[in-house]
Image (tube, helix red, strand yellow):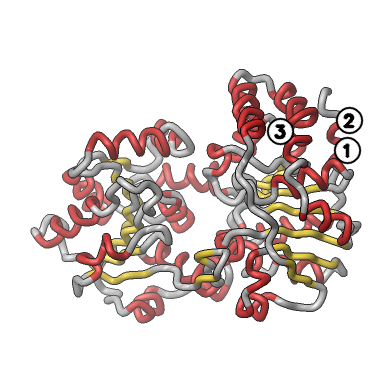
Amino acid sequence: MKHLMKRILLEINEGQIVRNLLENGLTRMLTAQDAEVLLVTPGASVPAFVSRYSHPGLTLHEALPDRPLTRVENYEFTLGRRLCRQGRHGARRRLWALWGERTAAKRAGAETVLLEAWKPDVVVSTHLSHIYGRGLVAAARRRGIPTVGSLMSWDNVWKGLKVRPDIVTCWSENNKDEICRMEGYAPEKVVVIGAPAFDAYMASEAQWTRRQFCDCLGLDPARKILLFATLGQFKQNIDETNPLEVLLHAIDAGKVPGRPQVLLRMHPWSRDVFFKRFMERPDVTVSRYENYVPGLTWCPTREEAILAGNLMRHADVVVSPGSTMCIEPAIFDTPTVVPVFNEYMPEVFEAYFQSTWLNQHFGRLLKNNWVPIVRSGEDMVMAINKSLCEPDWYQEGRRKIREEFLGPLDGQATERFAGLILQSPQGGQSERRHSSS
């Protein structure tokens, strides 16, 4: 491969992306090919972050301003989504080229100064459904600097791409179809690389035995393990504890044979105080990401990512009301049950799930019945028991999830992303010349 890019401006503004890219060695892959990398991140002002990630060829730069979308930008975004729903993808691209990119570039102040000072050969944005890299990418494109972006997670297209680089990388063919259909990208501008988030799961050092895993967490390898992964407190008035409460009551009542061990995996946005009464039980083991970096919030290490993979590898059943852990266990062919009920607020909970999950990225899983989605405590217990007794139940659905949602599972997604960055994509000005074709 002929590497043409020598000066790379890379922005990372969230801890998940640190796990996905820096912990997998992205910047070292780039500098190993004689590239210079300028990493723009809030972590640049945190000594522990600087110490962990600094290496020759990498320069760290303070975070750029993070400003909300203006009324004009919001209107362009809404109109663009509407055009895509109408199948007018060329019109959506023209709208961005003639109006959206110009308004986005107006937000670039410090970004413009940085581009002029650094003079990068390529600009890389790492979370396209956030607005952090919006002005940077727009300003770069208007200067003819090639831009590459990474879709951070499987559900991000449904949130809308606020950053629109020349080339977008994504997890899977399903993601590629969504980006083309819902954001108007031409297929040749979208590249499937797999999920860098899963690379750590595939590493040789991540292949723990059940004994190793149980010794790490103080579990009994001879007993069944139920992994309950919380949803995350994304909405203030939504209670996310009730399905766990129902599960523990069922175990206490002997409705789940063998008294399986419960491993409570806390989403970083879940609040400990809400789960305190469950955490204090001697038969509940708590697991969570622990590493935190100011400005980046939860910032998992590779070791923490390896543990997360082994949670799903060695659980006998995963129970999760809508988090990404509803699909990740398919990597390991682990039975999964998805409760979408709440006995305290049934109407509110149903409306929340319908609007934020079931009518969006989760819709295909529901429509195709690829994972058991249960709407009552009784059905959840029945599904867990069936999964424990018949691990092959829904195995075909898990295979479909692997094939259509998770992309290549070879541990090489980060390397493919690095390779794409090091190639010379078509620049922003050339994109505008062809936007009407």
In the depicted view, which residue is nearer to us: 50 or 225? 50
Q: Residue at x 43, y 55 (%)?
A: 329
Marks 2 and 3, the one that precedes in the sequence = 3
Q: Give the residue at mark 1.
A: 429
Q: Give the residue at mark 3.
A: 185
Q: CA distance from mark 2 to mark 3?
A: 15 Å
Q: Residue at x 59, y 37 (%)?
A: 160
In the depicted view, which residue is nearer to us: 300 or 311? 300
- The N terminus sits in image quarter: bottom right
Q: Callout 3: helix, strand or loop?
A: loop
Q: Give the residue at mark 2.
A: 433
Q: Callout 2: helix, strand or loop?
A: helix
- Disc 2 marks a residue whose amino acid type is Arg
Q: CA distance from mark 3 to mark 1?
A: 16 Å
Q: Residue at x 32, y 42 (%)?
A: 372
Image quadrant in which you'd find residue 286: bottom left
Q: Nearer the viewer, mark 2 or mark 3?
A: 2
Across the whole image, how many numbered discs are drawn on residues? Answer: 3
Q: Nearer the viewer, mark 3 or mark 1?
A: 1
